[in-house]
Amino acid sequence: MSAIIENTRNGALKRNLLRQMLQANVFKFGEFQLKSGQISPIYIDLRECFGHPQLAMLISEALSKQIESSGTEYSGVLGIPYAALPYASVAAAHFLKKPLLIVRKEAKSYGTKKLIEGLYKPNDCLVLIEDVVTTGGSILDVLRTLHAESLVATDVFCILDREQGGCQKLKDAGVNMHSLLDMNTVLTFLYSTGTITENQWHGIVKALNLEYSSPVKVDICLELENLSSLPYVDNIRSLLAEREALTDSPLNKKLVTLMRRKKSNLCLAIDYTTTDKVLQMIELAGPFVLAVKLHADAIRDFNEEFTSKLTTMANNMDFVIFEDRKFADTGNTTALQLTGIQKIAAWADVVTVHAVQGNDSIGGVFRKFVNDPSYRLKGILLIAQLSTKGSLTALNGYTESAVSIANDNRDVVSGFIAQTRVSACSDLLNWTPGINLDAKSDSVGQQWRGVDQAIDVQQNDIVIVGRGVTSSSEPVQQLKRYRQMAWDALTKNDTSIH
Ligand SMILES: O=c1ccn([C@@H]2O[C@H](COP(=O)(O)O)[C@@H](O)[C@H]2O)c(=O)[nH]1
């Protein structure tokens, strides 16, 4: 039951599944005979979900995520016939990219006469997908067929555990059962949303011999939550002191040390077009910021005298220089750009890099610069999510792919540009743009939200503030305001600070 009250992505995912199931008429009330012969006042008909593509995709995605995070080793996905087959197909082909296997209820009397269809060899280990588990009988039947073909299955993933003994029977047969939802959660949701009364709750619990004592009402509305605005990972940030000790990246060690010393997780985006104005703003901002972010190609009179002053100021005022170049080309071209007219690698501590060009065009080229002490460049931030409306980084799988490139290049990637926390690795820092306390959007695609949303709810580490400060007539006041709010939000539960 706790799953639906959790203030996490997982909790929101479960709430959304239940909300969409309710809309799709999955929960039916009356008198139904179950496969076991038992009479039930509730029937949970997950076949109704087939008619709602968005819901069917959400279920398949949730099952796939559960399979991935369980750490189970497997070579193929087998759907238990028939109701689980659509979810198993989408999960295997679309999300997990693994072969799909199907087991027949009865052998064909012609052709290959095979009971199990798909790509497999003896001793392969499969994960099983089921829709509803009541007694576990259908799964045990399938296990017998698999064993006869020398196939192994250690884990079954189901949408709903009716909590009527199936989990224990499977455990006795050596199989772990994982479920997205259980009956207690479903009944709590139905009762809390006023779909069933207290009397109905008791009637269902009694008829199904469930061992729940009394209904619990939780605060839950029927409006769908925006899953993409929530952190990808449910674990909370570790303490700053631990992160400082844990990280192998010299850049992140410097950043976390600076953060703690300056009490600042604020990066100022100075999008001015002349060197004078940029340097004047840095003079004001230096004491309050962790980093200064530039777009060198937007500065009309950009020159080497400027970068020399910039690096001196960074060294004296203790901030990191961040060039938001967003590299996105072949490795060869990126190397040329890093050493081209602006000599970015010589003065920037960190740069942004798109994930779109793929792994091989990222790791190799940046590793060369980061490991060469004659360059200032010490790390890159991969763009996992953009703040702009309609950004293609929201396409299914994009952010996960960026995270996977980061995982493959941990010596070079020091973190992400993202809207929500995207990685469970707490030594990778999440930098987030799209912050403004006084406006929600501009007229050309930017979307802003507040500091608490970004740091507290979405679990980012560093806020990137631009026009919220640079367009203000009182920039120092604004710098103090953003710095204080961001620091308070980051450290409010950090016992290594307080
Ligand atoms: O997704 C992204 C990536 C980068 N940015 C950059 O951050 C600043 C934001 O400035 P505002 O004035 O607060 O809009 C700007 O330099 C962008 O290029 C981003 O906004 N979103």
Image (cartoon, rainbow, N blue to C red):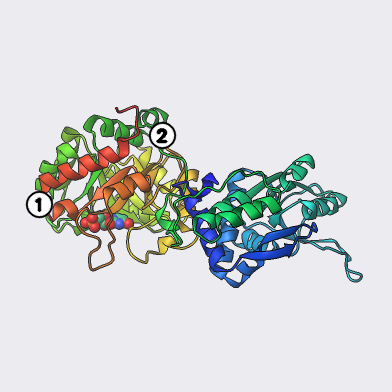
Nearest to the observer: residue 316 or residue 151: 151
- Residue 47 in picture, x, y percent from top left: 66, 67
Residue sitting at x 29%, y 61%:
447
In this rendering, is residue 476 above or below 398? above
Q: Is 162 left or right of 244, judged from the image as shown?
A: right
Nearest to the observer: residue 260 or residue 223: 223
Inspect the image, locate mark 1, and give the three-letter code of the amino acid beneath it: Lys
| Labels 1, 2: front one | 2
Residue 347 in view (yes/no): no
- Residue 351 in picture, x, y percent from top left: 31, 48
Instruction: Give the Cα distance between marks 1 and 2.
Output: 38 Å
Q: Which residue is mark 2?
A: 238
Circle 1/circle 2 CB separation < 8 Å: no
Q: Is 127 left or right of 240, judged from the image as shown?
A: right
Residue 398 in view (yes/no): yes
Q: Is 261 left or right of 205, judged from the image as shown?
A: left
Nearest to the observer: residue 227 or residue 416: 227
- Residue 151 in picture, x, y percent from top left: 80, 49
Helix, strand or loop at mark 1:
helix
* Label 2: few (<14), some (14–19) or many (≥20) C-alpha neighbours in 10 Å: some
Inspect the image, locate mark 2, and give the three-letter code of the amino acid beneath it: Ser
Q: Which residue is mark 1?
A: 277
Residue sitting at x 36%, y 40%:
370
- Residue 138 in picture, x, y percent from top left: 79, 55
Residue sitting at x 35%, y 55%:
327
